[in-house]
Amino acid sequence: MTLQELIAHVSGLFAKTCGRPPRWIVTAPGRVNLIGEHTDYNDGFVLPMAIEYYTVIAADRPAGDVKRIHLVSTSCETPVVIDPTQPLKPFPNGSWANYPAGVIAGFLARGLNPGSFDAMIDSTVPFGGGLSSSAALEVATATLLEVITSKKLDPVEKALLCQKAEHEFAGMPCGIMDQFISVMGRENSLLLLDCRSRRTELVPLKDPTVAVLIVNTNVKHQLTGSEYPTRRKQCEEAARILEVPSLRGANPRALEEARGRMDPVVYRRARHVIGEIERTVYASEGIRASNWAAVGQLMYASHDSLRDDYEVSCKELDAIVEIAQAIGIKGGVYGCRMTGGGFGGCTVALVKASAIEAISKKIAEDYKNKTGIEATIFSSRPAAGAMVIKA
Ligand code: GAF
């Protein structure tokens, strides 16, 4: 479904439910990260792009004298009612409503009260696929609240407000990558984000002969809840031993010197992060120089490191990377790696655009043979970040 089709669909649903067309429509994209995984909360570099898969919200003031926020999501059975005059608390049982509720709380904390509204939400970003469906929902909500309150936030403040919503309402101690790219994505560009200074640089990806291919393993292992915060703690432990504020300040030589003073697991976690930060910078240079083969090698190295040192891959992700590697440059694959938090979700590959169909067919067949699972395969050009469609 294109963005235009999704917008028409959500508008239609809103009109059907509320008996009038929506007054406001906003959208925010999911993302895929080309390289720089588990580096954002270590003050490192990341290189994501927004994808052509979106969350769309259509909204209006309620009819009559109704004092509440009413949120309906097409993919969740239970609509949510929020009283914006009361202090907001997280909903129990990991409710989807914690993402918008956390963002509403962030606006209220700034004295920006949206008042009552009805909202209809739909998304083409696959849930639990590691493509930041949650950041897309947070950023779309923040974009809607900017329109309703007539207060445009600074993009960095907006992304940080959404990250805080995820920390405090969804209980996920994420870094800043997903919210930044959903706010700041640009068509035809990757975003090189320095997570220490929060400075961003656009890295053009315009070459029509090169494409980004995303393969969803369609598995999500339930380890993610505790594994992510554990990785964060292990990185903090390594930084403490290395006497640096974060692993961004460390280098391979200092890590080797400290190896004897470190738990072997903590050592391997730090080795991944320090190497990945370096690979991300090299990859951005490789993309600028159209050196696709070199970028591809960095992607494979990233995957190996995530699998062996950071231990956030799984056999399904590994299977796709192995299939892609076997196809090789001759068959049109420059490089492939897991993307996002890990333990399932998606891989990202850099491929020759002319070979997309053949590559997709081969991956689908071999993955099904190896795992018994149907993969979902799609490509995306780098897309624009959050947008107001109707205000
Ligand atoms: C998840 C987190 F939300 C991001 O902040 C990032 O750490 C990513 O995992 C791993 O690179 O998407």
Image: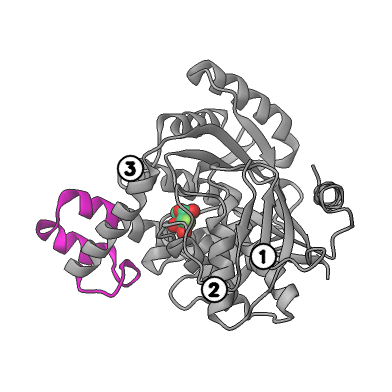
Taking the image as shown, residue 307 lies to the left or right of residue 176, namely left
Q: Secondary structure at mark 1?
A: loop
Question: Is the distance from the Cβ of mark 1 to the nearest ligand 1 atom less than 8 Å?
Answer: no
- Residue 68 - label: 1
Marks 1 and 2, the one that precedes in the sequence: 1
Q: Is residue 390 visible?
A: yes
The quadrant in which residue 77 appears is top right
Q: Is residue 256 above or below residue 195?
A: above
Quarter of the C terminus within the rendering: bottom right
Q: Position of residue 36 (x, y in %)?
A: 47, 57
Marks 3 and 2, the one that precedes in the sequence: 2
Q: Position of residue 159 (x, y in %)?
A: 57, 70
Residues rendered magenta in the picture: 242-271
Foreground of the two, 35 or 142: 142
For marks 3 and 2, give the one nearer the viewer. Answer: 2
Foreground of the two, 345 or 368: 345
For marks 1 and 2, give the one nearer the viewer. Answer: 1
In the image, residue 264 lies in the stretch drawn in magenta: yes
Q: Is residue 271 above or below residue 377?
A: below
The residue at the point 64 percent across, 80 percent down is 153
Q: Main secondary structure of the magenta part?
A: helix
In the image, residue 100 lies in the stretch drawn in magenta: no
Kindly report the distance in space between the C-alpha atoms of the residues bearing marks 3 and 2.
34 Å
Q: Position of residue 326 (x, y in %)?
A: 52, 28
* Residue neighbourhood size for the residue with mark 2, other residues' Cα within 10 Å, grouped as few (<14), some (14–19), many (≥20): many
* Kind of residue at badge 2: Gly
Residue located beneath label 3 in the image: 311
Query: Do the numbered discs 1 and 3 sit on residues whose CB atoms are within 8 Å?
Result: no
- Tell which residue pokes out farthest to the front in this image: 65
* Kind of residue at badge 1: Arg
